[in-house]
């Protein structure tokens, strides 16, 4: 198994893509720290992990990735449990309200940036220090299609996710000689609680019809599945992907070809 014994931290591990990645890496033998604001979410994902990989070691840390002390705490608790950080899926994020730039509001902009950009930076700051000392490690940051093209009505999300791409490229240059690889994924529309929430913002009770329209321009005309993203993350966190560095990998059914 590609990740046998590897110790991996996943933020946003209480739902969606973080949950799918947790299951995928646990099936390959990884030991996990799952970080999330939602304690209920973490417990539910722990159960899913144990259904898929009964012997998997799982540490749960309720924390807010926007708070430096919380980030320090999840890193410290992970190191106390496992002694090293082999992989880091730096993934927690929110979408924020859909609105024109002029109506977006500074408060909403700051809120989305705090989670999606500052939270990602703080995680990289603390984890890369440890990985550099170890001389090994893999970081996967969650960007988005919204980090490589304009989507509209998403000022905060667009700014943050383009920022995640910048952080990824910048740090990949700094840590390449230290045995640490840093990549980002750019998912298209993957059916998770976050995407359901934004479809409900647009379509109310008709959100499923809005969803069908939404994926029509996609070459595959469907939503991605969280487990498809989980499989990509598991690969990128494994030694098999050891020469992939500083890259932003779209996982979007081919939609990026049209940008
Ligand atoms: P989700 O809402 O299903 O899960 C996100 C998880 O992050 C939740 O469990 C939530 O509690 C947690 N979280 C939110 N704020 C947090 C904070 N401050 N501290 C700790 N945990 C926090 O969303 P998802 O679809 O799984 O999204 C995961 C990541 O993927 C996000 O960064 C999102 O922007 C990105 N993304 C998702 C899609 C998609 O289509 N689902 C597409 C592109 C990018």
Image: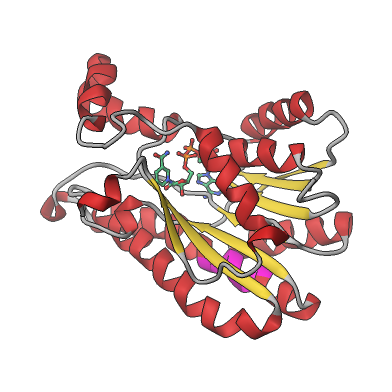
Q: Foreground: 237 or 102?
A: 237
Looking at the image, residue 217 lies above or below residue 161: above
The answer to whether 121 appears left or right of 255 in the picture is right
Which coloring applies here?
secondary structure
Looking at the image, residue 144 lies above or below residue 16: below
Whether the magenta-drawn stretch holds residue 115 is answered as no
> Which residue lies at the image location 41% right of the left edge and 66% below the top edge?
165
Instruction: Examine the image and state in which quarter residue 27 appears.
Output: top right
Looking at the image, residue 59 lies above or below residue 164: above
Q: Quadrant of the N terminus?
A: top right
Whether the magenta-drawn stretch holds residue 124 is answered as yes
Which segment is the magenta one?
121-127
Using the rendered image of the protein, determine whether residue 16 is visible from the camera's viewpoint. no
Q: Where is residue 51? Give x, y as percent.
A: 76, 23
> Which residue lies at the image location 83% right of the left edge and 49% below the top edge?
4
> Which residue lies at the image location 38% right of the left edge and 67% below the top edge?
163
Using the rendered image of the protein, determine whether residue 89 is visible from the camera's viewpoint. yes
Q: Foreground: 181 or 35?
A: 181
> Which residue lies at the image location 81% right of the left edge and 43% below the top edge?
29
User: Magenta part mainly helix, strand or loop?
Assistant: helix
Q: Where is residue 140? Give x, y as percent.
A: 57, 59
Q: Quadrant of the C terminus?
A: bottom left
């Amino acid at each position: 198994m590609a990740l046998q014994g590897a110790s991996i931290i996943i933020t946003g591990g209480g739902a969606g893509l973080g949950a799918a990645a947790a299951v995928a890496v646990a099936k390959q033998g990884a030991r996990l720290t799952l970080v999330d604001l939602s304690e209920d979410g973490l417990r539910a994902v722990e159960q899913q992990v144990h259904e898929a990989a009964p012997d998997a070691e799982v540490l749960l840390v309720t924390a807010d990735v926007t708070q430096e002390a919380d980030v320090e705490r999840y890193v410290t608790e992970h190191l106390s449990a496992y002694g090293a950080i082999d992989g880091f899926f730096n993934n927690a994020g929110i979408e924020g309200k859909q609105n024109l730039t002029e109506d977006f509001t500074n408060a909403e902009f700051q809120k989305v940036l705090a989670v999606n950009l500052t939270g990602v930076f703080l995680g990289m700051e603390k984890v890369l220090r440890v990985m550099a000392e170890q001389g090994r490690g893999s970081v996967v940051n969650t960007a988005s299609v919204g980090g490589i093209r304009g989507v509209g009505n998403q000022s905060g999300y667009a700014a943050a996710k383009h920022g995640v791409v910048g952080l990824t490229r910048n740090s990949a240059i700094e840590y390449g000689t230290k045995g640490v690889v840093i990549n980002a994924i750019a998912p298209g529309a993957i059916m998770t609680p976050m995407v359901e929430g934004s479809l409900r913002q647009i379509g109310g009770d008709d959100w499923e019809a809005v969803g069908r329209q939404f994926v029509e321009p996609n070459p595959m005309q469907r939503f991605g599945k969280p487990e498809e993203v989980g499989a990509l993350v598991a690969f990128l966190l494994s030694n098999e992907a050891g020469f992939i560095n500083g890259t932003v990998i779209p996982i979007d059914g081919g939609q990026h070809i049209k940008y």
